[in-house]
């Protein structure tokens, strides 16, 4: 199996079985929403930050497979990261989707599936929607 089909499989798997999906009714969570009009994606992300650490992350919304898979993977990899680490991950992710090299100590595992998105520029916004929501949420701390 080539790397591209492996990445596609990761994205499809998360689309079908998203992690941490569904919002929680708890006002200790910070909520942020974003829309991507070009594709029709809309997403709400919730994070719970305690002692400078993201201890929980939830998401809900509707969108294409790339948008939903990105939110699912983000909600998994961001847990137990501190705010500084999370901001570095946001920066690295914006490089990743442009096909640039990223620091494997900051981004690794399934999130790298989105490196192949650089060949589909029209879909980059789908992949970055959840990360933009995270950035917005972290800005409210
Ligand atoms: Zn989309």
Image (tube, rainbow, N blue to C red):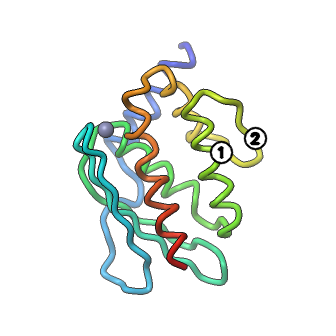
Query: In this view of the protein, which residue sits in the foreground, 121 or 28?
Result: 121
| Element type where label 1 sits in the image | helix
Q: Is residue 135 above or below residue 114?
A: below
Q: Quadrant of residue 16?
A: top left
Q: Position of residue 56 (x, y in %)?
A: 50, 71
Label 2 beta carbon within 8 A of ligand 1: no
Percent position (x, y) of residue 23?
31, 69
Q: Is residue 74 left or right of residue 37?
A: right
Neighbourhood count class around disc 1 (C-alpha, 10 Å): few under 14, some 14–19, many 20 upward: some
- Quadrant for ligand 1 reads top left
Q: Residue at x 52, y 33 (%)?
A: 114
Q: Residue at x 41, y 69 (%)?
A: 46
Helix, strand or loop for disc 2: loop
Res 133 → quadrant: bottom left
Q: Is residue 29 above or below residue 133?
A: below
Callout 2–callout 1 Cβ contact below 8 Å: yes
Q: CA distance from mark 2 to mark 1?
A: 7 Å
- Rendering coords of residue 105 (x, y %): 77, 46
In the current view of this chain or complex, which residue is farthest to the top? 2
Q: Foreground residue, 39 or 62?
A: 39
Q: What is the quadrant of the C terminus in the image? A: bottom right
Residue, disc 1: 92
Q: Is residue 23 above or below residue 9?
A: below
Query: At 40% across and 40% down in the image, what residue appears?
Result: 125
Image disc number at residue 103: 2
Q: Residue at x 47, y 71 (%)?
A: 47
Is 57 drawn above or below residue 120 in the view shown? below
Q: Which mark is residue 119?
A: none
Q: Position of residue 62 (x, y in %)?
A: 24, 50
Left or right? Give the position of 96 relative to 127: right
């Amino acid at each position: 199996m080539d790397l591209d089909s492996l990445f596609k499989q990761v994205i499809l798997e998360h689309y079908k079985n998203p992690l941490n999906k569904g919002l929680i009714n708890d006002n200790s969570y910070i909520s942020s929403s974003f829309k991507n009009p070009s594709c029709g994606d809309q997403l709400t992300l919730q994070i719970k930050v305690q002692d400078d650490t993201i201890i929980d992350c939830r998401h809900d919304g509707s969108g294409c497979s790339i948008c939903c898979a990105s939110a699912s993977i983000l909600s998994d990899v961001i847990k137990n990261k501190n705010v500084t680490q999370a901001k570095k991950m946001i920066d690295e992710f914006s490089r990743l989707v442009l096909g640039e090299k990223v620091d494997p100590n900051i981004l690794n595992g399934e999130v790298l599936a989105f490196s192949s998105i650089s060949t589909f520029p029209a879909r980059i916004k789908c992949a970055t929607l959840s990360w933009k929501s995270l950035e917005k949420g972290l800005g409210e701390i």
